Image (cartoon, grey):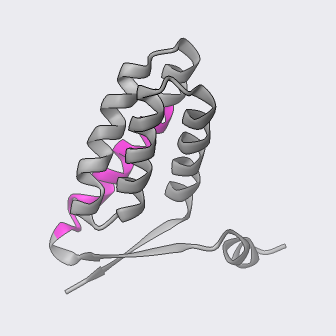
Amino acid sequence: MTDHNNEEQMGKIIVRVDEDLDDLIPGFLDNRHKDVETMKDAIASGDYETICVLGHSMKGSGGSYGFDAITDIGTLLETAAKDEDSLELQRWVNELSVYLGRVEVVYEQ
């Protein structure tokens, strides 16, 4: 199977972003990848407060950069953390990880 077929099966998610943000987006996405790892560790240790804070931050910042899905997932993470629901947290951390792996940024004027 070629890489092209893998991309088709995985379904790239195209996010169109204003070109003025091109210097900020790579760092923003890199930080979300780091958040995934932080939240995995936090789930394992029962640190719901850390996940709540990260989810709240994503809820506030995702849409500002054009990533509405990150805002939505952040909302769900924050809620699950407040409920101390580790199964839902695992679900949404995994969903965020998959999303980050599939997202492709297209810069527009």
What residue is shown at x 59% (from left), y 54% (from top)? 98
Task: Find residue 64 and report its horizontal and vertical position in percent.
Answer: 21, 61
What residue is shown at x 36% (from left), y 39% (from top)? 55
Task: Find residue 105 and report its horizontal and vertical position in percent.
Answer: 39, 72
Instruction: Pick the residue in front: 100 or 94.
Output: 94
**Residue sitting at the far bottom:** 109
> What type of secondary structure mainly makes up the magenta span?
helix
Task: Find residue 24 and report its horizontal and vertical position in percent.
Answer: 21, 58
User: In the figure, 70 relative to 5: above or below?
Assistant: above
**Residue sitting at the far right:** 1
Is residue 38 toward the left or the right of residue 16 in the image? Answer: right
Is residue 89 toward the left or the right of residue 64 in the image? Answer: right
Quadrant in which the N terminus appears: bottom right
Quadrant in which the C terminus appears: bottom left
Q: Is residue 23 inside the magenta stretch?
A: yes
Question: Which range is magenta?
Answer: 21-37
What residue is shown at x 35% (from left), y 54% (from top)? 71
